[in-house]
């Protein structure tokens, strides 16, 4: 236990030491108001949290639970689920971390998310060694009048697994993956399946690779979103099931709480109040039912399932050499989003579509080509004025797939989902390599 105490102290110190205030004026609209209400509501005792949990006969308190969540976790899910586990007689300790704006890769040390910070909300709840006490850090909008959260590094799964050595992981995530579809209603199965796989498999592989002690992963997929089509939501869930359903226990939150929600943010995705409680409670019932179905001694370590995981690694840079050089005329440009909507991320790509006038090197058979250009690097806007509609350019390109930019948030208003995205060689080398 002294070793665990020392590791946790080191980890907490690293988190606190890396936090710093941001000079930007943050404006995330009504979402901050919901977080403010949640901050108040979470301070009120929630009765009967453990009433629906049967007390297993002879079950000692020996399980350690790790809960990770995104902005929906900040809306009350993380706190309430944490309380559910703490009230369970099978559980010894619980560690909960919810960070705004995250996706599965945000929790890994690999590029391009190695140094990512969250600027729009952070909530951690940690058990203290040899005690029923806990340490809580809650920093979200509206905790006091005009309060803005500080910046916090997103905790890394490697560090958490080493310091906490959890038996159970609950991963609440997925809503931020909808942004990959750039507001389109249709999916391109082969392209989009490969895109999603890059976000899912590296996380699960890291989670179950020795010395991980995990025996259960509960993957809590997002509830219904009103900002993306049902086709996109169903595709994301089915692809998650296909990629990691054999190793994780996938929970379809769309079945657990009805849409529209009673207390819903204008983004038609975030919500608080009774529907949030209902969702959390139903997730807990499914977890509890699964945990109660078998003796824990019969549950094998997930590391034994590593060979069943499809070979896929996190995005990494491949040599920045041009596979295609074309002469092309610019015909459409996507307008970048405002900087405040980008946070907590710092890089962003937009799509420009060109008419092909000639192929200089390489092979390309389409009449148009989609090229993704950096609109933000390190939160600094990148000028796209030199790219003017109607002008012809010689472009040295490589496919976006396989580059460090491949999982960066992006927007493309062209609707040309049939076109494989490319990136200029000059822009490929502009990805920031040093910690920020």
Image (cartoon, grey):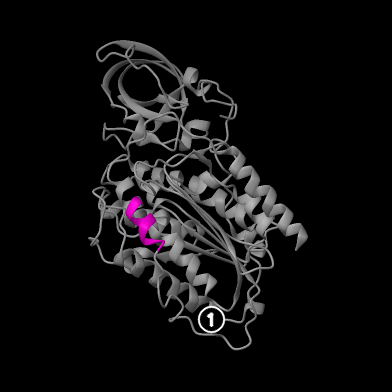
Q: Quadrant of residue 112?
A: top right
Label 1 neighbour load within 10 Å: few <14, some 14-19, many 20+:
some
- The verdict on residue 49 being magenta is no
Q: Residue at 56% across / 29% down in the picture?
A: 436
Query: Which range of residues does the magenta coloring cover?
Result: 36-43
- Vertical position of residue 101 compared to residue 408: above or below: below
> From this viewpoint, which residue is outermost toward the right?
2
In the image, is residue 41 part of the stretch drawn in magenta?
yes
Q: Residue furthest front?
A: 145
- Residues 283 and 18: in front is 18
- Between 342 and 183, the residue placed more toward the observer is 342
| Residue 5 placement, left or right of 15 | right
Predominant SS along the magenta part? helix
317 sits left or right of 53 in the view: right
Residue 125, percent from left and from top: 54, 58
x and y, in percent, of residue 252 in the image = 38, 65
Q: Position of residue 148 (x, y in %)?
A: 40, 40
**Residue 133 image point, x, y percent:** 60, 66
Which quadrant of the rendered structure holds the N terminus? bottom right
Label 1: which secondary element: helix
Residue matched to label 1:
292
Give the residue at x 49% y 84%.
54
Residue drawn at (61%, 82%) of the image: 295
| Residue 17 in sight from this viewpoint | yes
Residue 209 visible to an observer of this rendering:
no
């Amino acid at each position: 236990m002294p070793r665990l105490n020392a590791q946790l102290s080191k980890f907490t110190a690293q988190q606190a030491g890396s936090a710093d205030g941001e000079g930007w004026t943050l404006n995330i609209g009504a979402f901050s108001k919901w977080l403010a209400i949640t901050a108040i509501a979470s301070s009120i005792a929630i009765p009967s949290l453990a009433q629906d949990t049967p007390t297993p006969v002879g079950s000692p308190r020996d399980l350690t639970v790790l809960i990770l969540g995104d902005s929906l976790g900040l809306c009350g899910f993380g706190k309430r689920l944490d309380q559910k586990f703490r009230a369970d007689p099978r559980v010894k300790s619980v560690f909960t971390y919810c960070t705004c704006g995250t996706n599965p890769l945000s929790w890994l040390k690999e590029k391009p998310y190695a140094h990512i910070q969250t600027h729009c909300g952070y909530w951690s709840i940690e058990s203290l060694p040899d005690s029923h006490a806990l340490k809580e850090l809650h920093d979200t909008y509206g905790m006091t009048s005009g309060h803005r959260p500080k910046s916090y590094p997103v905790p890394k799964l490697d560090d958490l697994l080493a310091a906490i050595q959890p038996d159970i992981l609950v991963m609440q995530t997925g809503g931020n993956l909808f942004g990959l579809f750039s507001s389109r209603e249709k999916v391109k199965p082969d392209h989009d399946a490969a895109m999603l796989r890059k976000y899912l498999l590296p996380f699960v592989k890291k989670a179950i690779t020795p010395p991980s002690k995990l025996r259960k992963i509960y993957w809590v997929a997002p509830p219904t979103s009103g900002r993306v089509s049902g086709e996109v939501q169903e595709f994301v869930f089915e692809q998650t099931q296909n990629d990691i359903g054999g190793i994780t226990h996938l929970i379809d939150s769309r079945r657990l709480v009805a849409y529209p929600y009673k207390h819903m943010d204008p983004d038609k995705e975030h919500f608080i109040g009774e529907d949030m409680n209902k969702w959390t409670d139903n997730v807990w019932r499914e977890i509890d039912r699964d945990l109660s179905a078998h003796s824990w001694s019969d549950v094998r370590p997930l590391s034994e399932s590593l060979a069943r995981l499809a070979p896929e690694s996190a995005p990494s840079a491949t040599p920045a050499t041009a596979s295609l050089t074309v002469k092309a005329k610019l015909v459409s440009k996507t307008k970048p989003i405002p900087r405040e909507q980008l946070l907590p991320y710092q890089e962003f790509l937009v799509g420009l579509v060109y008419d092909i006038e000639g192929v200089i090197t390489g092979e390309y058979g389409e009449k148009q080509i989609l090229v993704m250009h950096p609109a933000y690097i390190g939160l600094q806007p990148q000028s796209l004025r030199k790219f003017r509609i109607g002008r012809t350019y010689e472009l040295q390109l490589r496919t976006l797939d396989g580059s460090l930019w491949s999982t960066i948030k992006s927007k493309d208003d062209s609707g040309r989902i049939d076109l494989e995205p490319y990136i200029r060689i000059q822009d490929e080398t502009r990805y920031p390599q040093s910690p920020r």
